Image (tube, grey):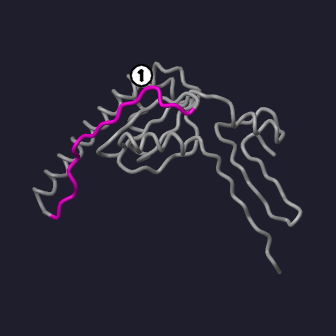
Amino acid sequence: MTPERLIATAEDRAVAEVDVPFGPLEELTPAGLVAHVLADRRLGLLLVRRGGYGAGVFAGGVLEASKVGSRHVQGTTKAGGWSQQRFARRRDNQAREAFAAATEVAVRILAPAKLDVLVCGGDRKAIDTVLEDPRLKGLLPLVRPPFLGVADPKQKVLEQAGADARAIRIQITEPDPS
């Protein structure tokens, strides 16, 4: 057992590996793991994709504050030459505006929330762009795995991501029968 991972082997040599959520684990015992997992935390959630964003604060599994939104970002085009370059510039500008809107929501919802943990999801580059804002520098040390793959951030997606962020991931490996 380590502060980040618990590995248990059964009598039949099956192995269970548990990644400690919101680690590191302070008490390296099974009881310590259970207490750690059941502890109430103020969980921040930041989801950003190219055209949508969402931020939420969960306390004890209950969504206390949230905001989701979207901005239109044009898709790619098969046009060539000047048109293709013009559309690429337009897409880049639209993406920049969408990330700026996501940043403002994160500043308003997450920055003042006194979080214990921040879980992110969506597009890594988009998340990195939002978290580069100096007003969010206090959130960087709170970022913990998992990084969630999500659809366009709508309210239901945000609520489900809150449950997914608190889920315990266990990988079981059965022994080779031979």
**Disc 1 target residue:** 135
Q: Residues within 10 Å of mark 1 (few under 14, many from 20)?
A: few
Using the image as rendered, state which of residue 112 and residue 100 is in the foreground: 112
- Amino acid under label 1? Arg
SS at badge 1: helix
For this view, does 17 lie left or right of residue 120? right
Residue 84 place in picture, x, y as percent: 15, 57
Question: Start and end of the magenta stretch?
Answer: 61-78
x, y percentage for residue 91?
21, 47
Comparing 14 with 48, the one in front is 14
Residue 151 is left or right of residue 75, and the answer is right
Number of marks in the rendered image: 1
81 drawn magenta: no
Q: Residue at x 19, y 47 (%)?
A: 89
Q: Is residue 64 magenta?
A: yes
For this view, does 20 lie left or right of residue 57? right
State the image coordinates of residue 175 (x, y, percent, origin top left).
80, 70
Specify the farthest residue to the right: 11
Residue under the point 48% across and 25% down: 137
Reply above or below: 100 against 150.
Answer: above
Where is 137 relative to 161, above or below? above
Does 101 sit above or below residue 121?
A: above
List x then y, in percent, for residue 149.
46, 51
Farthest front residue in view: 62
Residue at the extreme bottom: 178
| Residue 35 quadrant | top right
Please identify the quadrant where the C terminus is shown. Answer: bottom right
Foreground pick, 3 / 67: 67
